[in-house]
């Protein structure tokens, strides 16, 4: 058990992310996605700094380094609803540290902050071809929503 591990299971304690974690977040995401998405995370950070009450950012440390992160933003009245919904934007665990419960600890941390803010629902989007993430979401209690999201390449001609 480390000093930062309240549960005593060696996974690590959830903590708020800070500006000092930015490069570590981008690096972990790059390992997972295969691309350098610094612009995406810069935009998210700028939005969070502008409206901090509308975002939840958490991380878990292992052995003195950031091992995982999760970002969610809060939306009110989405799709005609009346309550506030947390939307999971990004979650990542360093590939060298996966399988140790860090992802689930991150979800627990998000949910704790959501409850504190009175938010009762979380939503996310997953590419159905990302089987590992689909399994993680299912194990975390997500279920398929009753709506279907469709996309279309607008560069191709419309059907006649």
Image (cartoon, rainbow, N blue to C red):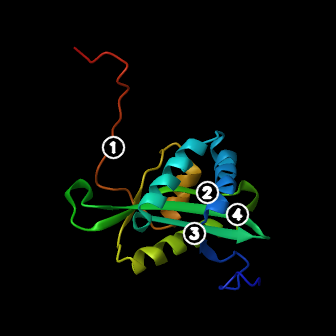
- Circle 3: is it few (<14), some (14-19), or many (20+) Cα within 10 Å? many
Q: Which quarter of the rendered picture does the C terminus lie within?
A: top left
How many numbered discs? 4
Which SS class for mark 3? Answer: helix
The reply to whether callout 2 and callout 3 are in contact (CB within 8 Å) is: no
The reply to whether callout 3 and callout 1 are in contact (CB within 8 Å) is: no
Whichever of callouts 3 and 4 sits on the residue coming sooner in the sequence is: 4
Q: Which of 139 and 52 is in front in this view?
A: 52
- Marks 1 and 2: which is nearer the front? 2
Report the Cα–Cα distance between label 3 and label 4. 10 Å
Q: Where residue 80 sits in the image (x, y, percent)?
A: 20, 57
The reply to whether callout 1 and callout 2 are in contact (CB within 8 Å) is: no
- Mark 1 lies on residue: 149
Q: Nearer the viewer, residue 142 or 12?
A: 12
Which SS class for mark 2? Answer: strand
Whichever of callouts 1 and 2 sits on the residue coming sooner in the sequence is: 2
- Circle 4: is it few (<14), some (14-19), or many (20+) Cα within 10 Å? many
Whichever of callouts 1 and 4 sits on the residue coming sooner in the sequence is: 4
- Mark 2 lies on residue: 92
- Spot the residue most to the right: 63
Q: Is residue 116 above or below residue 63?
A: below
Report the Cα–Cα distance between label 1 and label 4. 32 Å
- Mark 3 lies on residue: 106
Residue 117 sits in quarter? bottom left
């Amino acid at each position: 058990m480390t000093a930062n591990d309240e549960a005593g299971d060696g996974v690590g304690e959830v903590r708020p992310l800070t500006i000092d974690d930015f490069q570590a977040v981008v690096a972990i995401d790059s390992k997972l996605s295969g691309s350098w998405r610094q612009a995406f995370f810069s935009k998210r950070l700028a939005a969070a700094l502008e409206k901090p009450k509308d975002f939840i950012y958490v991380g878990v440390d292992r052995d003195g380094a950031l091992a995982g992160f999760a970002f969610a933003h809060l939306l009110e009245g989405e799709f005609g609803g009346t309550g506030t919904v947390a939307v999971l934007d990004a979650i990542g665990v360093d590939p060298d540290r996966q399988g140790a419960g860090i992802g689930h600890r991150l979800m627990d941390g998000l949910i704790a902050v959501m409850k504190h803010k009175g938010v009762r629902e979380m939503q996310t989007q997953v590419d159905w071809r990302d089987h590992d993430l689909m399994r993680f979401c299912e194990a975390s209690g997500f279920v398929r929503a009753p709506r279907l999201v469709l996309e279309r390449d607008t560069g191709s001609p419309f059907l006649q």
